[in-house]
Amino acid sequence: MSSQLSTLLSEQRRFPPTPEFAEGAHATQALYDEAVRDRLAFWAEQARTLTWIHPWQSVLEWTAPHARWFSGGQLNVAANCVDRHLSGARRNKAAIIWEGEPGDRRVYTYWELGQEVGRCASALKGLGVQKGDRVAIYLPMIPEAAIAMLACARIGAVHSVVFGGFSAEALRDRINDAECTVLITADGGYRRGSVLPLKRFADEALTDCPSIRHVVVVRRRPGGEGDEAFATMREGRDHWWHRLLEQAAPTCPAEPMDAEDMLFILYTSGTTGKPKGIVHTTGGYLTHVAATTKYVFDLKDEDVFWCTADIGWVTGHSYVVYGPLANGATVMMYEGAPDWPERDRFWKICARYGVTVLYTAPTAIRAFMKWGPEHPARHDLSQLRLLGSVGEPINPEAWIWYREHIGGNRCPIVDTWWQTETGGIMITPLPGVVTTKPGSATIPFPGISAKLVDVHGTVLEKGGGFLVLTEPWPGMLRTIYGDDARYRETYWSRFPGRYFAGDGAKVDDDGYWWILGRVDDVLNVAGHRIGTMEVESALVDHPAVAEAAVVGKAHDLKGQAIAAFVTLKDGHAATAEMRDDLKEHVAKKIGAIARPDDIFFSADLPKTRSGKIMRRLLRDIAEGRALGDTTTLADPGVVARLREMYEAEES
Ligand code: 7RM
């Protein structure tokens, strides 16, 4: 048994909901009962909270592995997230409260958000964007990111948001895979006091993106329009956002979309080198994220909801933009790093804006823990009433620290398990109803069917196994963009007829889920999914590299760190400069998040007789463990030599 599993098994602490919280909570036991009685009726009831242009004919049409939810129905996502809040008291309510890293601030009321979305939508139309066209968004965490997404949704264009931390090459691959016609970017974004030159990266990407016709550039830097260092504008192709929107009409009709029309594509890492374009559609996705936002975060009109995820990840899509805005909530948005200029930046923000619900990642919580409780202690966090966690397993110590030092031992914690592919939260406690256990995501959301299976696909009541989803759910991915065969193969072939999430899990005697993490060759570095193959492809792309094997290595803060074993081509020396050069090369190919922590040079890699690299053994070496079974190795001597070298280098 792994040490992780045994620690989790011994966790005995229980946190039942307080009567005060339960009394005011949206969620009730009845919600679970209803969903058990009739799953589809439950989801239909959630869908009815949205505004539809045309009612649906059937709740679900399921021809495995393809689902159609709310077929025949028509709606517009932007109209649901903005327009419908403009007729009553919410018209003047803050939709987005934003703070930039340098300390600049902006607030958009729902009315103002509507005007900006309208202008951006009109401007995109003016550039020739039509329903179904793909628009790439490569922006920092600024309000324009949400505005651009909603503007696309308004006119029926499909957005593909690319995380601002990704490299030019990663952006180029994503633009080309979806054949985007427009790119929306910025002259720069702030991170730890310096400017990330996004437009320069974009220009580098665009040297080989034949489908792009126009580039819209947000001026993020003060007076940046004339600053050639950050944005050189190409006549005819490039347009400043502020100029374009100034001339555009603030009203733009919302395109009636079929429930199954595409809303967005979001790329995520898999086990091969090529990222998958995860396809999400309109009616089911919005139903799922609206319902989970309401019940998991217990969102009320008075709340200030802060999901700290970047808009470039699915968490930003579902719980910064679509879920909260569909509920007419006030969203907090922050551009920069949690330790800039000081390690109390998050707590300063919580106090200044009276944040009531905070949703962040274990990697951040572990960093806060390391920095010490004196940072949150300096600020008034008494407005907080609910805390959330997402992105990776949260260890019980971090959970307890979060509860005590951020939540004042008063706020319930919701540990939410889900994926880019699931669209919205799948396994989570509902606050006010479910007793929590530190480290457990608890039980499936109402209307979600999760099961534990063994290697043969046999359903297990409890114990350890693989997490599968046995019934379609409204926010599920519909396919992989342009590659339905890969969709079937990746998610539906391991356990036929069931969706395999790629995670290992344990179910305890109470039926609670303890997610253990990925069982495939996908790493989770600080809550970000990175395929080992992606990093390996980047390494072998370097002219000096003959072969590379990448593994995850346990890391205190990041959960996992990247360790790479590299064999160099003849004539290249294994020097410290080479090591730095390779790290830099990976960062340039994929982005800084994929930069390996360790690179080890080796003349050979341990392989089976059929030539498969035995990553399990490399992990053992990287983590300093006793070696597992080496009997299947073609040359058992390789590992011993490798370990000696590794240990010599480490010391
Ligand atoms: C939302 C998101 C998905 C992978 C998933 C898991 C891991 C996410 C939790 C978690 C344990 C959690 N989407 N994961 N949430 N593991 N407990 N609460 O992160 O597509 O980027 O990643 O993240 O391994 O498969 S994602």
Image (tube, helix red, strand yellow):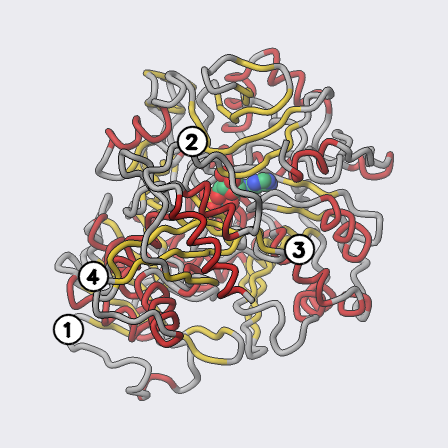
Q: Are marks 3 and 4 in contact (CB under 8 Å)?
A: no
Q: Position of residue 246 (x, y in %)?
A: 34, 72
Q: Is residue 49 left or right of residue 165?
A: right
Above or below: residue 194 compared with residue 632: below
Q: Amino acid at mark 4?
A: Leu
Q: Amino acid at mark 1?
A: Gly
Mark 1–mark 2 distance (CA, rounded to whole Å): 39 Å
Q: Are marks 1 and 2 in contact (CB under 8 Å)?
A: no
Q: Position of residue 272 (x, y in %)?
A: 31, 42
Above or below: residue 79 compared with residue 370: above
Q: Nearer the viewer, mark 2 or mark 4?
A: 2
Relative to the observer, which residue lies in front, 550 or 112? 550
**Under tag 4, what secondary structure?**
loop
Q: Nearer the viewer, mark 1 or mark 2?
A: 2
**Under tag 1, what secondary structure?**
loop
Where is mark 3, residue-wise? 304
Q: Position of residue 649 (x, y in %)?
A: 49, 66
Disc nearer the start of the sequence (3/2): 3
> Disc 2, ligand 1: is the CB inside 8 Å?
no
**On residue 127, which mark appears?**
4
Relative to the observer, which residue lies in front, 451 or 541? 541
Q: At 58% across and 15% down in the image, what residue appears?
A: 460
Image quadrant for the C terminus?
A: bottom right
> Disc 4, ligand 1: is the CB inside 8 Å?
no
Disc nearer the start of the sequence (2/4): 4
Disc nearer the start of the sequence (1/2): 1
Q: Amino acid at mark 2?
A: Met
Mark 3–mark 2 distance (CA, rounded to whole Å): 28 Å
In this view, the residue farthest toward the front is 637
Mark 1–mark 4 distance (CA, rounded to whole Å): 11 Å
